[in-house]
Amino acid sequence: VEAFGEVNEANSIKNAENWTARARYDRIQTGNWYWGGGASAQQDLFADLDLRTSIGPYVGRKFFTDPVFALEAETGLAYITEDFISAEDREYLGSTWDVRMQSNYLGGDSRLYIDHKGIWNLDEASNIVLNTTFGLAFPLLYGVEASAELVLDLNTGAVEGTEELDQTYRIRVGYA
């Protein structure tokens, strides 16, 4: 389970207000293969998105599990609904993927990571949502970690009048 959000302003003008919540269940099969199901909800008021929900199954594989380089990827199908504030709502079947890479190459229990998620609208092939996070995390105390991240969100099916690409620099504190 994970949840995060962003509220931001520059020069006393609000320029970001969004949140995302995800829940998943993985079932390990043979070796490095697994399958599972996931659900998510997302709101981004500056992208005219009142609520995007997604639910569906996936299959994944851990390709490398060494601490110096770990890589896992999964693909699946999801039923997606997008409720917009002013634009016409959409619902569709989507192809989903998730790629996670991490490395402890820098040492000191620090971790470099990339987390990339995608949704491809199977009804409208030109509509793709990509969420990519590049980060450096390091432990603080008692399982609490801090990280610096660059987050790129691309939506080729963005509502007219909104940006297709959103980039965010953030400092994150989490518990593992």
Image: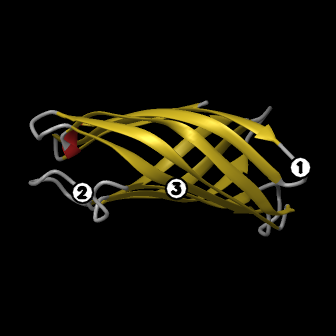
The residue carrying mark 2 is: 157
Quarter of the rendering occupied by the C terminus: top right
**Among the two numbered marks 2 and 1 on one chain, the one whose residue lies closer to the N terminus:** 1
Amino acid marked by disc 1: Thr
Whole-number angstrom distance, CA of label 2 to CA of label 3:
25 Å
The residue drawn where x is 13% and y is 39% is 88
Residue at mark 3: 149
Q: Residue at x 50, y 52 (%)?
A: 96
Q: Quadrant of residue 114?
A: bottom right
Single out the mark in the foreground, 3 or 1.
1
Q: Quadrant of the N terminus?
A: top right
Q: Nearer the viewer, residue 18 or 105?
A: 18
Residue at image point 47% right, 42% down: 78
Sequence-first disc among 3 and 1: 1
Amino acid type for the residue under numbered disc 3: Glu
Q: Position of residue 66 (x, y in %)?
A: 87, 63
Mark with earlier residue (2, 3):
3
Residue 21 appears in the figure: no
Spatial CA distance of label 2 from label 1 is 38 Å
